[in-house]
Image: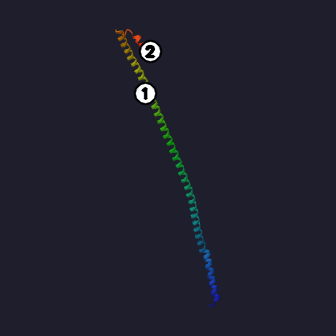
Amino acid sequence: MNINLTFLGQMVSFAILVWFTTKFIWPQLNHAIEERQKKVADGLAAAEKARAELKDADAKVANEIKQARQQANEIIERAQSQANQIVDKARAEAVSEANRVKANAAEEIVSMQLRAREELRGWVGRLAVQGAEKIVQREVDANAHKAMLDQLVAEI
């Protein structure tokens, strides 16, 4: 056998194999590789998009938490303000009630003083009449001298 002929046969076989591979096998392999690259690229893009969405969601959650805390603080401040207003109102009502009770007590004291004075004047008038009776040694008619006795009581 001739080496050149064998070499030429191998070259022709190799050329047919290369042609067959480039014609039928390589396009399908290339297509499969491109699909795989596309899937990997799409997966990476989806992962990047998911990271961005997660970052946005984290920012939104942080913002919502911040707003919730602000609202909670506002509610607490309003509640404290209302509590202070209720306490102030209760204090004012208590002071008003105390002043009213004090005024009523003062009026009652004045009224009791006036009654005591009137009672004392009556007693003084009766004592004066009794004293005058003893001095004059006769009975003074209180009904007959009522105007004079009332004047005496008013002066005392």
Q: Give the residue at x 42% y 22%.
A: 113
Circles 1 and 2 in contact, beta carbons < 8 Å:
no
Q: Give the residue at x 49% y 37%.
A: 88
Can you give x and y, in whole percent of width and height, for residue 52 in the image? 58, 58
Instruction: Tell how many labels.
Output: 2
- Depth check, mark 1 against mark 2: the one in front is 2
- In the displayed structure, 38 sits above or below 86; it is below
Image colouring: rainbow
Q: Residues within 10 Å of mark 1 (few under 14, many from 20)?
A: few
Going by the picture, which residue comes out furthest to the front?
A: 135
* SS for callout 2: helix
Q: Which residue is mark 1?
A: 105
Residue 155, disc: 2
- In the displayed structure, 44 sits above or below 86; it is below
Q: Nearer the viewer, residue 143 or 127?
A: 127
Q: Quadrant of residue 43?
A: bottom right
* Amino acid at the residue labelled 2: Glu
Would residue 54 appear left or right of 155 to someone viewing this image? right
Can you give x and y, in whole percent of width and height, for residue 91 in the image? 47, 36
Q: Give the residue at x 40% y 21%.
A: 116
Can you give x and y, in whole percent of width and height, for residue 40 in the image? 57, 66
* SS for callout 1: helix
Would residue 11 appear left or right of 143 to someone viewing this image? right
Can you give x and y, in whole percent of width and height, for residue 50 in the image? 56, 60
Q: Give the residue at x 62% y 87%.
A: 6
* Amino acid at the residue labelled 1: Ala
Gap between marks 1 and 2, in whole Å?
A: 28 Å
